[in-house]
Image (tube, rainbow, N blue to C red):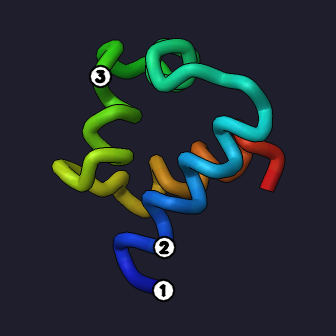
Amino acid sequence: MNANFIRERIAKLRTEKCISEYKMSLDLGHSKSYIQSISSGKALPSMSEFLYICKYLDV
């Protein structure tokens, strides 16, 4: 699994659920730009955070 796939999949699932980057970031307990930085390729979540994102998105 590569970084682009992870970013694209998170973005796709988030938009399918009509959740903004801002809301998801805050719901996950991060700064308002956390998910935006993942979506833009500036960052990747840690494994534990990735699993929490999966749970948040019901994956």
Q: Which mark is residue 56?
A: none
Residue assigned mark 3:
33
Please report the residue visible at 48 percent of the width from the left and 73 percent of the height from the top: 5
The answer to whether marks 1 and 3 mark residues whose Cβ atoms lie closer than 8 Å is no
Q: Residue at x 50, y 55 (%)?
A: 50
What crowding class fits label 1: few (fewer than 14 Cα within 10 Å), some (14-19), or many (20 or more)?
few
Q: Residue furthest bottom?
A: 1
Q: Secondary structure at mark 1?
A: loop
Task: Give whichever of discs 1 and 3 has the lower sequence position.
Answer: 1
The image quarter containing residue 16 is: top right
In three-dimensional space, the C-alpha distance between marks 1 and 3, rounded to whole angstroms, equals 24 Å
Relative side of 18 to 9, left or right: right
- Find disc 1 in the rendering and name its residue: 1
Of the 4 image quadrants, the one containing the C terminus is bottom right
Amino acid type at circle 1 is Met
Label 2 neighbour load within 10 Å: few <14, some 14-19, many 20+: few
Number of numbered labels in the structure image:
3
Type of the residue with mark 2 = Phe
Horizontal and vertical percent position of residue 2: 40, 82
Mark earlier in primary sequence (2, 3): 2
Dot 3: element:
loop
Q: Residues within 10 Å of mark 3 (few under 14, many from 20)?
A: some
Amino acid type shown at disc 3: Ser
Q: Position of residue 15 (x, y in %)?
A: 67, 36
